[in-house]
Amino acid sequence: MSAPESSPVHSTQNRTDASIRSGSLGAWFQRLPGALLPGALRPGPALGYDMMRAYLGIGLFVRGVLFVTEPELLLGYLQDVHSWFLPYALVHFVAVAHICGGLMLAAGLLTRLAAAIQLPILVGAVFLVHSSGGLLNPGQSLEFSALVLALLVVYFVFGSGELSVDRVLREAETRTAREVATPSLIPEMPLRSHQALLARAANPKS
Protein backbone atom coordinates (compact mmCIF):
# COMPACT_ATOMS: atom_id res chain seq x y z
CA MET A 1 0.00 0.00 0.00
CA SER A 2 1.20 3.51 -0.74
CA ALA A 3 1.49 6.12 2.03
CA PRO A 4 -1.47 8.50 2.23
CA GLU A 5 -0.76 11.79 0.59
CA SER A 6 -1.04 14.89 2.76
CA SER A 7 -3.70 17.36 1.80
CA PRO A 8 -2.78 20.85 0.55
CA VAL A 9 -4.29 22.34 3.71
CA HIS A 10 -2.01 20.30 6.00
CA SER A 11 1.09 21.06 3.94
CA THR A 12 0.33 24.79 3.98
CA GLN A 13 -0.19 24.69 7.74
CA ASN A 14 3.07 22.82 8.26
CA ARG A 15 4.97 25.39 6.22
CA THR A 16 3.35 28.20 8.22
CA ASP A 17 4.27 26.59 11.54
CA ALA A 18 7.84 26.08 10.36
CA SER A 19 8.16 29.69 9.27
CA ILE A 20 6.78 30.89 12.62
CA ARG A 21 9.23 28.68 14.49
CA SER A 22 12.15 29.83 12.36
CA GLY A 23 11.11 33.47 12.77
CA SER A 24 10.88 33.17 16.54
CA LEU A 25 14.23 31.40 16.67
CA GLY A 26 15.77 34.11 14.51
CA ALA A 27 14.42 36.83 16.78
CA TRP A 28 15.63 34.89 19.81
CA PHE A 29 19.14 34.63 18.38
CA GLN A 30 19.11 38.35 17.62
CA ARG A 31 18.19 39.12 21.23
CA LEU A 32 20.64 36.59 22.65
CA PRO A 33 23.75 38.85 22.91
CA GLY A 34 21.80 41.53 24.74
CA ALA A 35 20.09 38.98 26.97
CA LEU A 36 23.40 37.52 28.12
CA LEU A 37 24.89 40.93 28.94
CA PRO A 38 24.20 42.88 32.14
CA GLY A 39 21.77 45.74 31.87
CA ALA A 40 24.49 48.40 31.95
CA LEU A 41 26.35 46.76 29.02
CA ARG A 42 23.40 46.29 26.68
CA PRO A 43 23.50 48.45 23.55
CA GLY A 44 21.44 51.58 23.91
CA PRO A 45 21.51 55.26 24.87
CA ALA A 46 22.61 54.48 28.43
CA LEU A 47 25.71 52.64 27.21
CA GLY A 48 26.54 55.48 24.81
CA TYR A 49 26.21 57.96 27.68
CA ASP A 50 28.69 55.97 29.77
CA MET A 51 31.12 55.47 26.88
CA MET A 52 31.12 59.21 26.16
CA ARG A 53 31.87 59.91 29.83
CA ALA A 54 34.77 57.43 29.80
CA TYR A 55 36.14 58.91 26.56
CA LEU A 56 35.91 62.43 28.00
CA GLY A 57 37.73 61.38 31.15
CA ILE A 58 40.50 59.61 29.26
CA GLY A 59 40.96 62.64 26.99
CA LEU A 60 41.28 64.99 29.95
CA PHE A 61 43.72 62.61 31.64
CA VAL A 62 45.93 62.52 28.53
CA ARG A 63 45.77 66.31 28.32
CA GLY A 64 46.88 66.58 31.94
CA VAL A 65 49.83 64.25 31.34
CA LEU A 66 50.77 66.39 28.33
CA PHE A 67 50.75 69.55 30.48
CA VAL A 68 52.98 67.82 33.04
CA THR A 69 55.54 66.66 30.49
CA GLU A 70 55.44 69.86 28.42
CA PRO A 71 54.32 72.75 30.67
CA GLU A 72 55.44 75.33 28.13
CA LEU A 73 52.35 74.48 26.06
CA LEU A 74 50.15 75.94 28.77
CA LEU A 75 52.59 78.66 29.77
CA GLY A 76 52.37 80.03 26.23
CA TYR A 77 48.73 80.97 26.87
CA LEU A 78 49.70 82.83 30.07
CA GLN A 79 52.30 85.19 28.65
CA ASP A 80 50.15 88.24 29.37
CA VAL A 81 50.02 87.45 33.09
CA HIS A 82 52.51 89.81 34.77
CA SER A 83 53.52 87.49 37.56
CA TRP A 84 56.11 84.76 37.95
CA PHE A 85 54.09 82.69 40.45
CA LEU A 86 50.57 82.71 39.03
CA PRO A 87 51.35 81.04 35.65
CA TYR A 88 53.19 78.12 37.27
CA ALA A 89 50.46 77.75 39.89
CA LEU A 90 47.81 77.62 37.17
CA VAL A 91 49.82 75.06 35.19
CA HIS A 92 50.07 72.77 38.21
CA PHE A 93 46.38 73.20 39.05
CA VAL A 94 45.23 72.49 35.49
CA ALA A 95 47.49 69.46 35.15
CA VAL A 96 46.44 67.91 38.47
CA ALA A 97 42.75 68.70 37.84
CA HIS A 98 42.87 67.09 34.38
CA ILE A 99 44.71 63.99 35.60
CA CYS A 100 42.68 63.33 38.75
CA GLY A 101 39.38 64.59 37.38
CA GLY A 102 39.86 62.70 34.14
CA LEU A 103 40.41 59.40 35.95
CA MET A 104 37.37 60.06 38.14
CA LEU A 105 35.22 60.82 35.11
CA ALA A 106 36.43 57.74 33.25
CA ALA A 107 35.57 55.51 36.21
CA GLY A 108 32.37 57.35 37.10
CA LEU A 109 33.60 58.11 40.62
CA LEU A 110 32.23 61.33 42.16
CA THR A 111 31.30 62.35 38.64
CA ARG A 112 29.63 65.65 39.49
CA LEU A 113 32.60 66.74 41.61
CA ALA A 114 35.06 65.73 38.89
CA ALA A 115 33.10 67.71 36.30
CA ALA A 116 32.81 70.73 38.60
CA ILE A 117 36.59 70.83 39.02
CA GLN A 118 37.03 71.00 35.24
CA LEU A 119 34.39 73.66 34.61
CA PRO A 120 36.42 76.77 35.61
CA ILE A 121 39.34 75.56 33.49
CA LEU A 122 37.21 75.04 30.38
CA VAL A 123 35.32 78.30 30.90
CA GLY A 124 38.64 80.10 30.93
CA ALA A 125 39.84 78.17 27.88
CA VAL A 126 36.71 79.00 25.88
CA PHE A 127 36.10 82.62 26.82
CA LEU A 128 39.58 83.88 27.71
CA VAL A 129 42.10 81.87 25.71
CA HIS A 130 40.57 80.55 22.48
CA SER A 131 37.80 83.10 21.89
CA SER A 132 40.19 85.49 20.17
CA GLY A 133 41.01 82.87 17.53
CA GLY A 134 37.39 82.55 16.39
CA LEU A 135 35.54 79.57 14.96
CA LEU A 136 37.43 79.57 11.64
CA ASN A 137 40.80 78.83 13.24
CA PRO A 138 42.54 75.87 11.51
CA GLY A 139 43.47 74.46 14.91
CA GLN A 140 39.77 74.33 15.95
CA SER A 141 40.74 74.93 19.57
CA LEU A 142 37.61 76.96 20.32
CA GLU A 143 35.23 74.33 18.95
CA PHE A 144 36.93 71.51 20.80
CA SER A 145 37.07 73.40 24.09
CA ALA A 146 33.40 74.39 23.76
CA LEU A 147 32.46 70.76 23.11
CA VAL A 148 34.34 69.58 26.20
CA LEU A 149 32.71 72.34 28.25
CA ALA A 150 29.23 71.32 27.06
CA LEU A 151 29.87 67.67 27.94
CA LEU A 152 31.14 68.61 31.37
CA VAL A 153 27.97 70.61 32.00
CA VAL A 154 25.89 67.57 30.99
CA TYR A 155 27.67 65.22 33.38
CA PHE A 156 27.64 67.82 36.14
CA VAL A 157 23.85 68.11 35.84
CA PHE A 158 22.85 64.49 35.15
CA GLY A 159 25.57 62.51 36.91
CA SER A 160 27.56 59.45 35.99
CA GLY A 161 25.16 56.89 34.49
CA GLU A 162 24.61 53.17 34.94
CA LEU A 163 28.11 51.85 34.21
CA SER A 164 29.99 53.71 36.93
CA VAL A 165 31.53 53.38 40.37
CA ASP A 166 28.93 55.82 41.71
CA ARG A 167 26.13 53.40 40.86
CA VAL A 168 27.97 50.49 42.52
CA LEU A 169 28.43 52.53 45.68
CA ARG A 170 24.78 53.59 45.70
CA GLU A 171 23.61 50.00 45.37
CA ALA A 172 25.97 48.86 48.15
CA GLU A 173 24.69 51.64 50.41
CA THR A 174 21.09 50.68 49.65
CA ARG A 175 21.75 47.01 50.46
CA THR A 176 23.45 47.98 53.71
CA ALA A 177 20.52 50.18 54.71
CA ARG A 178 18.08 47.34 54.03
CA GLU A 179 20.08 44.89 56.11
CA VAL A 180 20.05 47.11 59.20
CA ALA A 181 17.26 45.92 61.50
CA THR A 182 14.81 48.59 62.58
CA PRO A 183 14.20 48.69 66.36
CA SER A 184 10.79 47.60 67.55
CA LEU A 185 8.47 50.20 69.06
CA ILE A 186 6.72 47.62 71.30
CA PRO A 187 8.57 47.07 74.59
CA GLU A 188 9.37 43.46 75.27
CA MET A 189 9.05 41.79 78.64
CA PRO A 190 12.35 40.62 80.10
CA LEU A 191 12.95 36.92 79.63
CA ARG A 192 13.33 36.04 83.31
CA SER A 193 10.09 37.79 84.37
CA HIS A 194 8.24 36.07 81.53
CA GLN A 195 9.52 32.68 82.63
CA ALA A 196 8.57 33.44 86.24
CA LEU A 197 4.98 34.28 85.26
CA LEU A 198 4.70 31.06 83.26
CA ALA A 199 6.00 29.05 86.20
CA ARG A 200 3.47 30.65 88.59
CA ALA A 201 0.63 30.00 86.18
CA ALA A 202 1.62 26.37 85.88
CA ASN A 203 1.92 25.91 89.68
CA PRO A 204 -0.67 28.19 91.30
CA LYS A 205 -0.23 26.53 94.78
CA SER A 206 3.43 27.41 95.04
Image (cartoon, grey):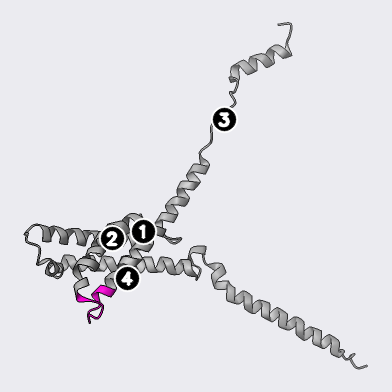
Q: How many marks?
A: 4
Please check the rendered image and state whether residue 186 is part of the magenta-colored stretch, yes or no: no
According to the image, label 2 marks what residue? Answer: 119
Amino acid tagged 4: Leu
Among numbered discs 4 and 3, the one appearing first in the sequence:
4
Provide residue 90's location: percent of width, then percent of height: 16, 59
Q: Secondary structure at mark 3?
A: loop
Label 3 and label 1: CA atoms lie apart by 41 Å
Spatial CA span between label 4 and label 3? 55 Å
Question: Which residue corresponds to mark 4?
Answer: 147
What secondary structure do most residues of the magenta stretch adopt?
A: loop
Q: Nearer the viewer, residue 65 or 83?
A: 83
Cα gap from disc 2 to disc 4, whole angstroms:
12 Å
Residue 112 lies in quadrant: bottom left
Identify the disc placed on residue 184. Answer: 3
Crowd rating for badge 3 (residues with CA inside 10 Å; few <14, some 14–19, many 20+): few
Q: Position of residue 62 (x, y in %)?
A: 25, 68
Q: Which amino acid type is shown beneath numbered disc 2?
A: Leu
Tell me whether circle 1 and circle 2 mark residues in contact (CB < 8 Å).
yes
> What residue did someone put label 1 on?
156
Q: Tag 1 or tag 4, which sits nearer the N-term?
A: 4
Q: Is residue 175 above or below residue 123?
A: above
Quadrant occupied by the N terminus: bottom right
Q: Is residue 124 visible?
A: yes
Task: Give 156 or 81, whichever is nearer the viewer.
Answer: 81
